[in-house]
Image (cartoon, rainbow, N blue to C red):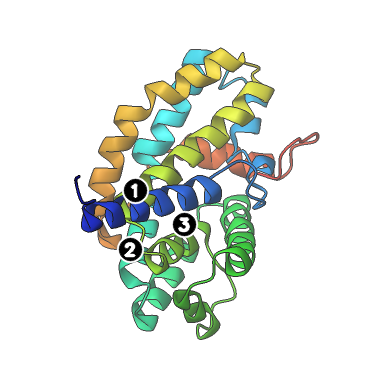
């Protein structure tokens, strides 16, 4: 009779726990209000920049490769590394706050970050959350809080980034399905098409520095600004 390999069993249990937590945190049912934001996509549809499946796919791909999607992954990776260092975390938050291109995008990341911190503190507490109590910053940016939570629960940086990136894409697709409109199958095709791009973006974001960050999605920023004064709106951003 074979004796179970205790090390293997422990590794499986750890991987299952980490996966369960990530699936919970990045689920559409996790109450951070992600469904209320569109990152300017609503205005892009309103003004005719996005009209169909092809337009939507390109828009989301560009955000992941060149825009806020990439920047958020960098912030998450750096927060994971700085989770136990108050000074580094404070500097990261200050930079990430200043980096937000519009007031609505800043609202989006700070509102979701505050909600994620409050809920996760109750349901999935960890020592690293105490870092936020010692900081002067009142804003809790979403990718930063997720990065700290992942480190606090010993969830791998790469896994956390993939899960966060997938949730970012899925939320934009959900908005597009309602706004363009697109069929549910179209939405899943967009998500599937983003898989290799997200994998590459996560890999590059893991080794990026704040000094290397840039944003080339100018039209996304403009639509976000226009959305602030749009007459009828379904989304907050």
Q: Which residue is mark 3?
A: 143
Which badge, 3 or 2, is on the more N-terminal residue?
Answer: 2
Q: Which residue is mark 1?
A: 159
Q: Which residue is located at x 40 percent, y 53 percent?
A: 18
Q: Which residue is mark 2?
A: 78
Instruction: Specify the quadrant that holds the C terminus.
Output: top right
Residue 170, x across and y down, in percent: 52, 33
Which badge, 3 or 1, is on the more N-terminal residue?
Answer: 3
Q: Nearer the viewer, residue 19 or 135?
A: 19
Q: Residues within 10 Å of mark 3 (few under 14, many from 20)?
A: many
Left or right of 220? Residue 176 is right
Give the SS element for disc 3. Answer: helix
Check contact, mark 3 vs mark 2: CB within 8 A: no
Left or right of 25? Residue 234 is right
Q: Nearer the viewer, residue 192 or 67?
A: 192
Q: Which residue is located at x 50 percent, y 45 percent?
A: 23
Question: Is there any visible trace of residue 218 in the rendered image?
Answer: yes
What is the tally of numbered marks visible in this picture?
A: 3
Residue 159, x across and y down, in percent: 34, 48
Residue 140, x across and y down, in percent: 55, 67
Compute the Cα span from label 3 to label 1: 14 Å
Q: Residue furthest front?
A: 1
Kindly indicate the quadrant of the structure image that contains residue 111.
bottom right
Tell which tag, 2 or 1, sits nearer the viewer: 1
Compute the Cα span from label 2 to label 1: 14 Å
């Amino acid at each position: 009779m074979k004796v179970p390999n205790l090390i293997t069993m422990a590794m499986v249990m750890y991987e299952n726990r980490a996966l369960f937590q990530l699936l919970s945190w990045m689920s559409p049912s996790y109450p951070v209000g992600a469904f209320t934001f569109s990152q300017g996509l609503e205005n892009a549809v309103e003004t005719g920049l996005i009209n169909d499946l092809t337009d939507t796919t390109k828009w989301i791909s560009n955000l992941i490769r060149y825009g806020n999607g990439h920047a958020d992954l960098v912030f998450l990776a750096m927060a994971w590394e700085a989770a136990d260092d108050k000074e580094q975390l404070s500097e990261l938050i200050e930079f990430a706050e200043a980096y937000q291109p519009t007031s609505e995008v800043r609202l989006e990341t700070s509102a979701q970050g505050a909600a994620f911190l409050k809920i996760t503190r109750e349901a999935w507490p960890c020592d690293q959350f105490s870092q936020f109590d010692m900081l002067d910053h009142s804003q809790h940016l979403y990718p930063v809080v997720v990065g700290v939570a992942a480190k606090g629960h010993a969830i791998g940086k790469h896994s956390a980034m993939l899960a966060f990136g997938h949730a970012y894409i899925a939320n934009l697709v959900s908005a597009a399905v309602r706004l363009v409109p697109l069929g549910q199958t179209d939405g899943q095709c967009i998500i599937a098409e983003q898989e290799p791009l997200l994998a590459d973006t996560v890999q590059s974001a893991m080794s990026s520095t704040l000094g290397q960050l840039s944003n080339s999605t100018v039209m996304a920023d403009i639509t976000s600004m226009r959305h602030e004064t749009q007459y009828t709106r379904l989304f907050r951003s």
